[in-house]
């Protein structure tokens, strides 16, 4: 069973991580991909990375988690979980999700 950080989403016939979908809906430009860095003394060890992942898992995040699904007719449905108020929301379009995100930001 994947944990909440490895949950893949399918959007427009390509695999998208939930963080990428959130960035896309917020119209955030992605950072350019950088080649993998070689292991140096400054890079975190395997235990440090494991500890950081465990810390993030228990601490949680304030960012909403967005999952795309399809209804029986094949239309996309956007299910959003807001960890701040611990509620689930369902939207029929990306535009509706964007409006909700804007309203959430200014609350």
Image (tube, rainbow, N blue to C red):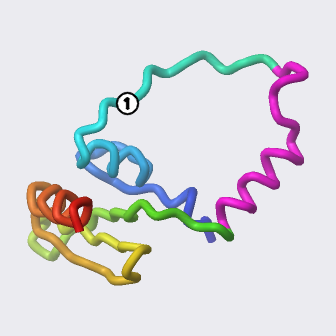
**Residue lying at 37% horizontally and 81% vertically, measured from the top left:** 85
Instruction: Give residue 83's quadrant in the image.
Output: bottom left
**x, y percent for residue 74:** 13, 66
Q: Secondary structure at mark 1?
A: loop
| Residue 61 can be seen in this image | yes
**Residue placed at 38% from the left, 56% from the top?**
9
Residue at the limit of the structure toward the front, as seen here: 107
Badge 1: few (under 14), some or many (20 or more) residues near its Cα, within 10 Å?
few
Q: In terms of image quadrants, where is residue 105?
A: bottom left
- Residues 81 and 102: in front is 102
Left or right, 25 with respect to 67, comes to left
In percent of width and height, residue 99 lies at 12, 60
Instruction: Tell me the quadrant of the picture where the N terminus can be found.
Output: bottom right
Magenta residues (range): 39-57
The residue sitting at 38% across, 44% down in the picture is 20
Task: Give left or right: position of 21 versus 3.
Answer: left
Snapshot quadrant of residue 13: top left
- Answer left or right for 6 relative to 57: left
35 versus 61 height, above or below: above
Identify the residue position indicated by label 1 in the image: 30
Q: Can residue 15 be seen from the camera position used here?
A: no
* 8 versus 23 height, above or below: below
* Spot occupied by residue 57 in the image (x, y as percentages of width and height): 66, 65
Residue 62, position as x, y percentages in the image: 46, 64
* Quarter of the image where the C terminus is located: bottom left
Query: Is residue 51 part of the magenta span, yes or no?
Result: yes
Q: Does the magenta stretch mainly form a helix, a strand or a loop?
A: helix
Please state the total of marks drawn on the protein image: 1
């Amino acid at each position: 069973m994947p944990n909440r950080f490895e949950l893949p989403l399918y959007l427009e016939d390509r695999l998208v991580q939930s963080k990428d979908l959130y960035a896309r809906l917020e119209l955030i430009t992605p950072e350019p991909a950088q080649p993998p860095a070689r292991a140096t003394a400054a890079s975190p060890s395997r235990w440090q990375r494991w500890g950081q992942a465990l810390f993030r898992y228990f601490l949680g995040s304030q960012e909403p988690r967005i999952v795309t699904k399809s209804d029986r007719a094949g239309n996309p449905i956007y299910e959003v979980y807001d960890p701040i108020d611990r509620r689930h929301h369902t939207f029929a379009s990306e535009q509706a999700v964007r409006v909700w995100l804007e309203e959430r930001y200014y609350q």
